Image (spheres, rainbow, N blue to C red):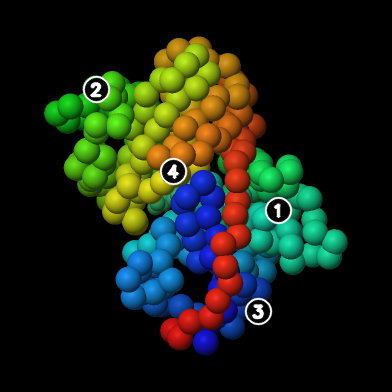
């Protein structure tokens, strides 16, 4: 039997397992089964707590719903932070964890968790990609790869069709990318919808996608930090950043909810 905790960060949901003793060894197929919304627990991804190797409090491994490992996950990082903070007694206010994208920290702030993200890189604007219905497409890696396109009518957009067209476009081969669609709500406020690589569909929120979209909103409009981001699941989260000039940024932060839903055990 596998014991797990079900959590979500603004509707982006996860199966969380404590594998600090490294006794759990799930195959790609088993992770996909756990994330299956009809035959398993159902989730956008799986978060595994493992022992740190380089001095942080923990190691955070992230797996998409298709069972493939990804570099990290922003909403997942908030849930990971809230989950691991409870492993200490008394509950820690700040935890650090190693990911493929670098060592991150999570700070518990009331009902929210703030993630200090790794520095974005490979930022590239106005890509040589022309897709019907979409204007300019931009790219940045905010821990995982993200394409961002601004659209006029976000609610009416076919996110799956347009998202898959970007996610599988040759320009992003061989690893592909996540695809975000954004529109401005106000000077420091945007709304986004996200098609996620490895989920192969729209998720209710995507933390690293929010970071990517907020950075381009700053570049395109001069909006100051922090930028509010409305996501498909109905939450509004906050992205902080420090512009360094030349489209480079540091001190990117992602602040939002991390909710415990239930614990359970399942045959694997
Ligand atoms: N939902 C995540 C992103 C997961 C990224 C994953 N879909 C990939 O890059 O393969 C977030 O909140 O940042």
Q: Nearer the viewer, mark 4 or mark 1?
A: 4
Q: Tell me if residue 261 comes above or below residue 133 in the rendering.
A: below
Instruction: Residue 217: give x, y in percent of width and height.
Output: 45, 21
Tell me if residue 149 can be seen: no
- Helix, strand or loop at label 2? It is loop
Q: What residue is pinned by disc 2?
A: 135
Circle number at residue 96:
1
The residue shown at (62%, 72%) is 18
Q: Please say if the residues under marks 1 and 3 sit with CB atoms less than 8 Å apart.
A: no
Q: Earlier in the sequence, mark 4 or mark 1?
A: 1
Q: What residue is pinned by disc 3?
A: 21
Dot 4 crowding, Cα within 10 Å, few <14, some 14–19, many 20+:
some
Quote the CA–CA distance across marks 3 and 2. Answer: 49 Å
Quote the CA–CA distance across marks 2 and 1. Answer: 39 Å
Quote the CA–CA distance across marks 2 and 4. Answer: 25 Å
Instruction: Residue 193: give x, y in percent of width and height.
Output: 36, 37
Q: Please say if the residues under marks 4 and 1 sit with CB atoms less than 8 Å apart.
A: no
Q: What residue is pinned by disc 4?
A: 233
Q: Earlier in the sequence, mark 2 or mark 1?
A: 1
Could you tell me which quadrant the C terminus lies in? bottom left
The residue shown at (58%, 72%) is 263
User: Farthest right residue?
Assistant: 90
């Amino acid at each position: 039997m596998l014991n797990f905790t079900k959590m979500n960060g603004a509707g982006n949901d996860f199966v969380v397992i404590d594998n600090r003793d490294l006794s759990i060894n799930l195959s790609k197929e088993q992770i996909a089964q756990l994330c299956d919304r009809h035959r398993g627990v159902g989730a956008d991804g799986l978060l595994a707590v493992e022992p740190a190797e380089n001095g942080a409090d923990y190691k955070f491994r992230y797996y998409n719903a298709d069972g493939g490992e990804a570099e990290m996950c922003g909403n997942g990082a908030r849930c990971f932070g809230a989950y691991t903070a409870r492993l200490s007694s008394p509950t820690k206010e700040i935890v650090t964890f190693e990911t493929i994208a670098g060592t991150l920290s999570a700070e518990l702030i009331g009902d929210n968790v703030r993630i200090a993200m790794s520095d974005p890189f490979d930022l590239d604007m106005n890509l040589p990609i022309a897709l019907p219905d979409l204007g300019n497409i931009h790219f940045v890696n905010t821990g995982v790869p993200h394409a961002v396109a601004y659209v006029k009518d976000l609610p009416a957009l076919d996110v799956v069709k347009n998202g898959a067209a970007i996610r599988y476009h040759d320009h992003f081969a061989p690893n592909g990318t996540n695809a975000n669609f954004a529109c401005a709500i106000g000077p420091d406020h945007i709304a986004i919808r996200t098609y996620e690589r490895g989920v192969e569909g729209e998720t209710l929120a995507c933390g690293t996608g929010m970071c990517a979209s907020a950075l381009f909103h700053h570049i395109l409009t001069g909006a100051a930090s922090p930028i509010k981001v409305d996501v498909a699941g109905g939450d509004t989260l906050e992205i902080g950043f420090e512009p360094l000039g030349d489209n480079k940024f540091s001190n990117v932060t992602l602040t939002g909810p991390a909710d415990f839903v239930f614990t359970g055990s399942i045959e694997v």
